[in-house]
Amino acid sequence: MATNKRTSEHLRYRYGICLNENCDKCKSKEVQEIPTRKEFICQNPDCGKPLRECPPPKKGISKQVLLGILAALLVVSGVVAYLLFGGKEKESLSKPKPAVVATIDSDSIRAAQQAEDQIAMKQKQDSLQAVADSLARVAEEARLAEEKAKEKAQSTPAPAKPVTPTTPRSSSGSKDLGYATFKGTWPNDVNGRMIFKTSHVIDNRDPKGRIAEAGDYVIGEFSEGHLVQGIWYGADNVVKGSVIIGK
Ligand SMILES: [Zn+2]
């Protein structure tokens, strides 16, 4: 970009010095920049003599800046290479500095490429790791879902069964517990029904201490007179929750 600009500048201007010894611009040896479309004469209003063409003034600063940028680039790439490969690239770093521009050669290019390769490899490893992670996560989720489904299947022995007074096991009898009536085979029944007559804790072993209201009932597995697991319904036959206590 900078070079382009300079080239176009060079095309748009001519440069000359005045040779009139009586002219200030001659005395100061000023290089005058004259647009190409203008007459190539001294810009001193008191002079106006034709100029002698000369090369454009050296843009020393911009060249220096360019060299500085190149040197900085080299230093940066050298540091990167050094950090990445330890002392391996020390050699190229310890080369005499004056050869800085010339040193942007195969060495630093190779170092940069190696660095790139290294980064690409790291990224590849990272993405592989990410894939493995997500696979593990999916597997874990699947396992959890399966467990949940199993648990659900266990805790709903009669899923969505219309809870109408069709007492399936009325033949097994019933037991009056005072606060509740148990329908089924007391004290062990895999599908017993506890109908609460008054507000009472569902099971005194329930760590959550859930309390059924009068009219609520629980259908589920009972063992030694204790609820193992079951579904808790309200008097309106709406499920209030599942109760899993265990044996
Ligand atoms: Zn002049």
Image (cartoon, rainbow, N blue to C red):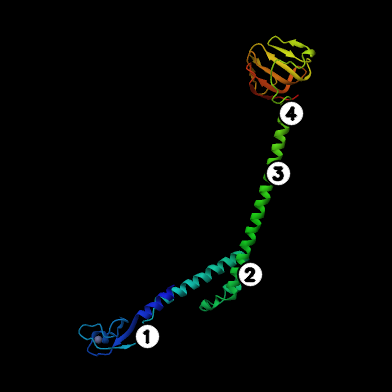
Dot 4 alpha-carbon crowd within 10 angstroms: few under 14, some 14 to 19, many 20 or more: some
Residue type at mark 1 is: Pro
**Which quarter of the rendered image does ligand 1 occupy?**
bottom left
Q: Are marks 3 and 1 in contact (CB under 8 Å)?
A: no
Q: Position of residue 94 (x, y in %)?
A: 57, 74
The amino acid type of the residue labelled 4 equals Gln
Give the structural element (helix, strand or loop) at label 1. loop
Labels 2 and 1: the sequence-earlier one: 1
Residue type at numbered disc 2: Lys
Q: Which quarter of the figure has residue 38?
A: bottom left
Gap in Å between the C-alphas at discs 2 and 4?
65 Å
Q: Which mark is residue 55?
A: 1
Which residue matches tag 2? 88
**Residue at image point 58% right, 68% down:** 112
Residue sitting at x 74%, y 14%: 183
N-terminal of the pair, mark 4 or mark 3, is 3
